[in-house]
Image (cartoon, rainbow, N blue to C red):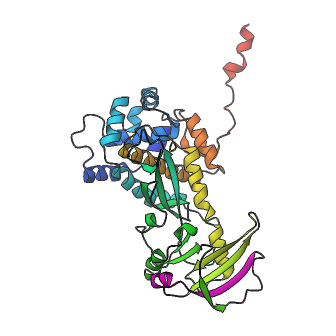
Amino acid sequence: MSNLTLFSQIISKLDRNRFSALVKKHETDKHQKGYNSWTHLVSMLFCQFAKSQSLRDISNGLRSATGDLNHLGVKQAPSKSNISYQNKHRSWELFRDYYFVLLKSLGQQAAFKQVKFKIKSKIFLLDSSTISLCLSLFDWAQYKTQKGAVKMHTLLDFDGNLPAYVNITDGKTADNKGAYNIPLLKGSVIVADRFYNDFSLLNVWDSNKVFFVIRHKENLRFDTVKELELPENRHPHLLKDEIIELKNETSKQKYSGKLRRVALWDDENKQVIELITNQLSWCANTITELYKSRWQVEIFFRDIKQLLHIKSFIGTSKNAVMIQIWTALITILILKALRAMAEHKWYLSNLVAFIRLNLFVKINLKTWLDKPFGEPPEKSILNQHQGVLF
């Protein structure tokens, strides 16, 4: 047993000193009256773990943990008006920066590789996901005539399936336009779908010694320079491997170098998938497997939308929405770190559901993670003989 709740023990995993340094940098506690940045963070993490549907749920939920708030570093449960005001006015950049601080520590614990690639390059998966909003409430999030939205442009690190970069824009921003500012690591490989088939963007990546594997559009015009022989041990779905040059003059001005084109058969959807890459030496099998790994970014978007509180928002200002998204990312990072340290083979959906049910239960976190279905304690001798009295 433990004197601390599961939620308190989870919060204790966070580096509070680094958070305080960021608070000082962003001056987010300047002129605050009681509801400081740490209390704000704990409140929003509670919102995510408990999947609270309103400000009242957050306030009442924390009030119900009377006596345990000191272990959270919180003096008293915030009122709903306090949460609302600070969601609107406290800089969301504090929570963004803290996510990347935690990524350097907790992210290392969560790291793993699902597939063994025979390459040394760091692998990143690039995609975006649209989060719909009601335009009448979120009038700043213009998307369509009667619909609002924000878009998460996400560069996912293949090791651990955690975002290495997130750019949150309005819903109208095209996928390729939202990708121009992603950090580029020399020698790494970026895997993306056809929406990133922008030759100006690909030229930027190539100039920075970054490899890419992109699904090209059906209307791509090219000349075949050399057709490569398919290996004897090729995957049965591999159809073609060739070196090409762009034929369209406008495209050629944007990207003048040679490209490699690999075609494969998608048996599930009964279609041919055509890829282009600036990597000319890797095995064609490796290139096709890299593109298949892109599905992990879709799984990440599914997890964060289904398991956490990100499809509806407790505040309507842009700042409140950004804070809720970034605290959701911090929560998914914590969950993956907890799963990595557990001996029990948790599915992420089961882990978040079980934590939600036992948030204020007092039990040792590591013991519970390792043996969530442990045997109940033996009955005491007193309990065994109580029936004799009657």
**Left of 5 or right of it: where is 383?**
right
Q: Please tell me which residue is depicted at 60% across the width and 72% down the height of the picture.
A: 217
Q: How many numbered circles does the render carry?
A: 0
Classify the position of the C terminus by image quarter: top right
Q: Please tell me which residue is depicted at 53% across the width and 44% down the height of the picture.
A: 308
Vertical placement of residue 65 versus 28, above or below:
above
Instruction: Name the one closer to the observer, 336 or 149.
Output: 149
Is-magenta flag for residue 248?
A: yes
| Residue 142 screen position, x and y as percent | 42, 49
Vertical placement of residue 33 versus 167, above or below:
above
Is-magenta flag for residue 292?
A: no
**Left of 242 or right of it: where is 131?**
left
Classify the position of the N terminus by image quarter: top right
The residue lying furthest to the left in this view is 31
Instruction: Name the one closer to the observer, 315 or 357.
Output: 315
The residue lying furthest to the bottom in this view is 226
The residue lying furthest to the top in this view is 390
Q: Please tell me which residue is depicted at 61% across the width and 75% down the height of the picture.
A: 219
Vertical placement of residue 230 versus 180, above or below:
below
Report the span colored magenta.
229-254
| Residue 178 screen position, x and y as percent | 44, 63
Q: Please tell me which residue is depicted at 69% across the width and 22% down the height of the picture.
A: 381
| Residue 234 screen position, x and y as percent | 75, 81
Instruction: Name the one closer to the observer, 119 or 14.
Output: 119
| Residue 320 screen position, x and y as percent | 38, 43
Tell me if residue 224 can be seen: yes
**Left of 315 or right of it: where is 229?**
right
Tell me if residue 76 can be seen: no
Instruction: Name the one closer to the observer, 193 or 106.
Output: 193
Vertical placement of residue 233 versus 107, above or below:
below
